[in-house]
Amino acid sequence: MDYFIASRHWVSSKANGNYGDAAIREEACTMDQGKIWAYFQGKGVKSFDDAIPRLHFLLKKAKKYFSLPSIRVLNIGIGNGWLERECLGLGWSTCSLDPDEDAVRRVAILGVDGRKGSIEEIPFEPGNFQIVFCSEVLEHLHREQLVRGISEIGRVLAPGGYLIGSVPYNEDIESGKTVCPRCGLVFHRWGHHGAFTRKSLNELLCNSGFKVTDLGIRTFLDFSRGTPKNKIGLIVHWLLGILGSPIATPVIYFIAHKKHSIYVNS
């Protein structure tokens, strides 16, 4: 089943195997996500500051399920390390997974068990975590990586554990593309490969052995910034996000409960 929508990568027929024109297939084969990620984990790391309201929301959701300090959590995709620091502050045993070695080093200094690797091959033992955070990661994956990644999350989650995360809502992948002035390669500026709706994301999780307990659309904003006049604009922006308006760049947040073992050996 195809879970991505709104991208020429995945909307064409599964039966005939046609996933787009030659230029798009070339992008899928040659695009190096590592270079994009390394930039944002280095010189562009300040861009992750805008993610703090979203991560704060997801952490607040997590605390409703687990309040004891004995739990073990994994964050996939380090960003600026905000979530790791907050989890450590709660007394949670905190681990991180990221393809960028420098990012792993930064959180390791804090006392995090950080490991370099990919979501398709998570370098932790089965049943290790009560919570796995995976925020703004799944949209970076091709279809095969996506299915394998969700399976791996299920493998490392303990029985009764939760997957908590987010993805952009109904993203227009084509409008986010740009072209390299040197080689002419067309690529998505943030390395996104697929878009999700509530329905497609729910189907992906349910078909992968999870039970979705919470799923919604909203925009995450920092209401502590700016003047009262600006805050009125933020409220309007927030309401547009709940309605799913693309003007507000909304995201889908999700919480999914592991129902049973979903690990698939390859």
Image (cartoon, rainbow, N blue to C red):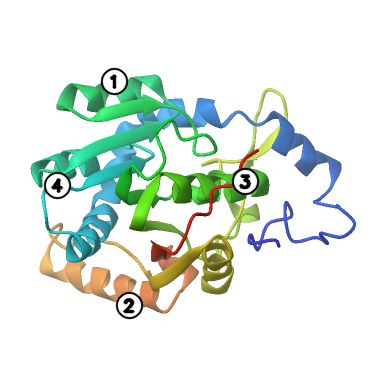
Whichever of labels 3 and 4 marks the residue nearer the N terminus, that label is 4
- Contact between marks 3 and 4 (CB within 8 A): the answer is no
Name the residue beneath numbered marker 3: 177
Query: For numbered disc 3, what is the local secondary structure?
Result: strand
Find the distance from the CA under tag 4 to the CA under tag 1.
24 Å
Towards the viewer: 251 or 91: 91
Report the mark closest to the observer, 4 or 1.
Answer: 4
* First in residue order: circle 1 vs circle 3: 1
- For the question of whether residue 86 can be seen, the reply is yes
Distance (Cα) linking label 3 and label 4: 44 Å
Q: Quadrant of the N terminus?
A: bottom right
Question: How many residues crowd around disc 3 within 10 Å: few (fewer than 14), some, or many (20 or more)?
Answer: some
Of badges 2 and 1, nearer the viewer stands 1
| Labels in figure, total | 4
| Residue 70's disc number | 4
> In the image, is 226 to the left or to the right of 136?
left
The residue beneath circle 2 is 239
- The one nearer the camera, 187 or 198, is 198
Q: At which x and y percent is residue 218?
A: 36, 70
Eyeballing the image, is 202 above or below 41?
below
- Percent coordinates x, y for residue 185 in the rendering: 71, 32
**Which residue is label 1 attached to?**
105
Label 1, secondary structure: give it.
helix
Please, what is the three-letter code of the amino acid marked with disc 4?
Ser
